[in-house]
Image (cartoon, rainbow, N blue to C red):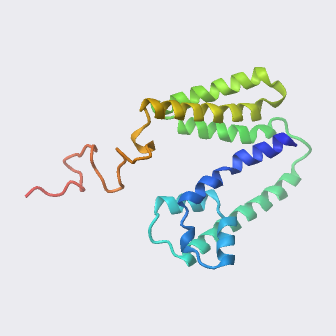
Amino acid sequence: LATLAITTFLVNSRHLFYAFSFPLSVVEGRFAKFYSVYALVDEAYALTVARPQGWTKPRILAMQVLFQSTWVASGLVGVGLGSLLPGTIPGLDFALCAMFLTLALDAARTRAEVPSLLLAGLATLLAWFAAPGQWLITSLLLFVALLVARYVWAKSTGRLPSDAREDGAGARSPGDRTGVEESPDDPAKGVDA
């Protein structure tokens, strides 16, 4: 039961960070705000962060109703289809782990992510031997601790990437093309007079 509670907390803790940049201030009214917080799904957060300007109360609420309805409907379809499956299917319980492995491999397409992958591998290996019966939750907690330690070390040695610095030094705004190579055919470059 403790493993289930900790796993649920860790998976859902991303919503704590969503609240910092979600435009909840646009939503007026107690019920509307309550629903907006309740129905905050990953897709709604991604859309509002990708285009932070221009959100109105009706647009946000309509988007959230649509996305939450999709989540509920697909969940019900999944329950219905799952009930049709005969008994247990060996390996089906690994589907969620396989999805996270796929996401991790997709995220690790650059050299900058190699240290995080190595830390994840180290956390898994240590957890496998230290807590064989609870290796998954142990590796998640250990990985979070290692990421925090890596961040503290990088901050103290001045090795944070420019977009992760709190002072914003080196961070570019969406329209800033500083440091971006321009080709002769680049329409953003303009026409030479």
Q: In this rendering, is residue 92 above or below 122?
A: below
Residue 110 makes an appearance in the image: no
The residue that appears at 79% across and 56% down in the rendered structure is: 78
Number of numbered discs on residues:
0
Q: In this rendering, is residue 135 above or below 176?
A: above
Q: In this rendering, is residue 118 above or below 85?
A: above
Residue 75 makes an appearance in the image: yes
Farthest-out residue, top: 129
Give whichever of 167, 180 is nearer the camera. Answer: 167
Apparent side of residue 95 relative to residue 120 in the rendered image (left or right):
right
* Residue 8 image position (x, y, % from top left): 76, 47
Give whichever of 94, 48 is nearer the camera. Answer: 48
* Residue 63 image position (x, y, % from top left): 59, 70
Q: In this rendering, is residue 56 above or below 131?
A: below
Give whichever of 136, 21 is nearer the camera. Answer: 21
Q: Quadrant of residue 125?
A: top right
Farthest-out residue, front: 156
Q: Quadrant of residue 119?
A: top right
Give whichever of 11, 17 is nearer the camera. Answer: 17
Q: Locate the C terminus by quadrant.
A: bottom left
* Residue 90 image position (x, y, % from top left): 84, 35
Apparent side of residue 148 relative to residue 175 in the rendered image (left or right):
right
Q: Locate the N terminus by quadrant.
A: top right
* Residue 28 image position (x, y, % from top left): 59, 78
Farthest-out residue, right: 87
The residue that appears at 32% across and 56% down in the rendered structure is: 175
The residue that appears at 21% across and 54% down in the rendered structure is: 189
The residue that appears at 47% across and 32% down in the rendered structure is: 156
